[in-house]
Amino acid sequence: MNSPCIIEVRDLRKTYRAGEVDVHALRGVNLDISQGEFISIVGPSGSGKSTLFNVVGGLTPPTSGTVRIGGKDLAGLSDADRTNLRKTMVGFVFQKYNLLPTLSARDNIEIARHIAGRNSNTNARFQQVLELLGIGHRLHHKPRAMSGGEQQRVAIARAIVNDPAILLADEPTGNLDTENSAIVLDLLRDLNERMGQTILMITHNPEAASYGHRTVHMRDGSIVDTQLTLE
Amino acid sequence: MSERHRSKYAGNGTIRWYLLNKLVLENLKHRPVRTLLSVLAIGVEVTMMLTLVGLSHGMLDESARRARGVGADIVIRPPGSSVISLSSAPMSDKFIQFFEKQPHVSLAVGTMVHPIGGINTITGIDLDRFNRISGGFRYESGGPFKGPDDIIVDEFYATQNNLKAGSMHELLNRQWRVAGVVEPGKLARIFVQLPVLQELTGNTGKLSQIYLKVDDPARDDEVVRHLRSIPALKDYYIYTLEEFTSLISVNNVPGLRAFIYVIIGLSVIVGFIVVFMAMYTAVLERTREIGVLKALGASSGYILNLLVRETVLLALLGSVLGILMTFGSRWLIETLVPASLTQQIVPSWWPVAAGIAVVGALLGALYPGWKAAKQDPIEALAYE
Ligand SMILES: Nc1ncnc2c1ncn2[C@@H]1O[C@H](COP(=O)(O)OP(=O)(O)OP(=O)(O)O)[C@@H](O)[C@H]1O
Ligand SMILES: [Mg+2]
């Protein structure tokens, strides 16, 4: 890859303190991600995949090591700085879609623009994202009136509507049946191929992992292997 | 923040308000029972304040109206009395002649007031003099005193106690005959002959209040100045009627102000507790959503903003309901206890009561808001 490196992780460690014991969730992770890459992360439960996301996404500070996103170092960022980072630099997608239940699908997407202080209706990206979703006619529905697959597509739209440097998807198909999984994975691939969206996706499913350009294997808080996906 | 960002915010005003308000509204609609109960509780809080204020105003206005109904120009009250209450009758009735000798005073009328429990008093009058100063009672039924056991009551009191001319009525451990029922609005509600009351209460020859008529209305102030300059009257309260009625206010009724404060304090505590519970449960059940907002980059200020909007909206809805309910409480008082207390609707207090409700509600939202704002997004997102 000769595209610029958008994420650079060096010797990243994260230790949680749970009562009296220290839990070493990350024990020296190194990872480079180029712009436009689609990377899958796999590994057993408890191997630190979500923790890596939370640190890279600025939800929690690292214990040591460096994380650079678009050249910006996360070390030493205050809570407020990390909040600002989340506004525009990263987008999250979770296993449990996590839409706001009282807002319509459209408003769920719009509120992300709103939090970032941007206007939605006049924005070309907003329209483009809505079109990619393929559920234009259901946008005025509340989440509970939508299928899991539809909710997850809305959640993806919400995550990318602010044009983040990276989209972090933590088991986005974990709650979906095969058919809906395929729709969501196709949407992610579309975003990556057509809009150049950089994507980092955690999954337990090898078939889902094969959507990425390469697959990173984690175990006990470290990266143990990286495989390129064969076309 | 860069200039570019600043201008984006500025051009974005309508959208910003609109979406936040929509979220707040949807959240309130999402839990209709909790929302209704909160609004109702704040409504009761506001009604409590407004009803009390309305009753005080009603009572005081009634007093002022009756004082004006006497038709006097000047009021003289003994040392140590307050505007609303006269507890004893310490003025000698020799004062009557003394005042009538003063320049421009055409008539002096003494009365004696004796409390009979509750807010009621019985008033002793010299009917001839009282008729001269006030222009006379208008009798709805019956007529003037005929004997020492006769009382005159106003229609208000008559309705309240089911009396008509000729009825017997017990007051001060004595049976009285109702000689006449008169139109309300003159001095008092229950009248007996002055000497009868003086003797009955052991105040022979004593008065509690003296009213003066001045021969020329333009000279009221002049006469008051003159009377105040008389050394023997140094400790007496001497007012023009205008001054006197303007003194009939919440501030001059001993204890009333404190009582109002206590009720307002209790109301605020009720509002505080209700909003605290409502917002606390709201924050708990929205833990996940707050986590999502934070993951999207919402600052603590943004979260607080949402909760403050919700709280203020609850308080305002509650205030509107509370104001409406004061009309209901007035109707209840009039229907259940007719011709007793008059509750006024006091619109100038509406914003005050609403303001107090909003402040109480915001205090209640303080802790839940702080809890929401400091929530760790990772834990919030892991919350079931
Ligand atoms: N907030 C926390 N406090 C304490 N320990 C934590 C916390 N979050 C995660 N851990 C611990 O860190 C380790 C890594 O957890 P993590 O959630 O990153 O694993 P994962 O690879 O995402 O697992 P899964 O596949 O089950 O989602 C685990 O041992 C977990 O118990
Ligand atoms: Mg995980």
Image (spheres, coloured by chain):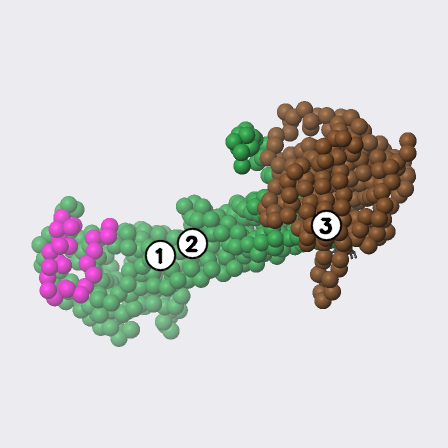
Chain colours: A brown, B green
Q: Is residue A169 left or right of residue B274?
A: right
Report which residue position mark 2 lands on. Answer: B53
**Residue type for callout 1:** Val
State yes or no: discs 2 and 3 in contact (Cβ < 8 Å).
no
Closest to the camera, between mark 2 and mark 3, is 3
Q: Residues within 10 Å of mark 2 (few under 14, many from 20)?
A: many
Q: Chain of mark 3?
A: A
**Which structural element holds mark 2?**
helix
Magenta stretch: give its range.
B219-243
User: What's the distance in space between the residues labelled 2 and 3, CA to CA?
Assistant: 66 Å
Residues A197 and B232: in front is A197
Residues B48 and B304: in front is B304
User: What's the distance in space between the residues labelled 3 and 1, CA to CA?
Assistant: 70 Å
Residue B58 — which label?
none
Report which residue position mark 1 lands on. Answer: B250
Residue for point 18% across, 56% down: B212
Residue A12 — which label?
3
Residues A46 and B168: in front is A46
Q: Determine if marks 3 and 1 fall on one subunit.
A: no
Spot occupied by residue A26 in the image (x, y as percentages of width and height): 76, 53
Closest to the camera, between mark 3 and mark 1, is 3
Identify the image quadrant of the N terminus of chain B: top right
* Tally of marks: 3
**Residue type for callout 3:** Leu
Say whether residue A188 is visible: yes
Q: Determine if marks 1 and 2 fall on one subunit.
A: yes
**Which structural element holds mark 1?**
helix
Residue for point 72% across, 32% down: A4
Mark sitting earlier along the chain (1/2): 2
Spot occupied by residue B208 in the image (x, y as percentages of width and height): 24, 65
Spot occupied by residue A142 in the image (x, y as percentages of width and height): 74, 38
| Magenta region includes residue B236 | yes
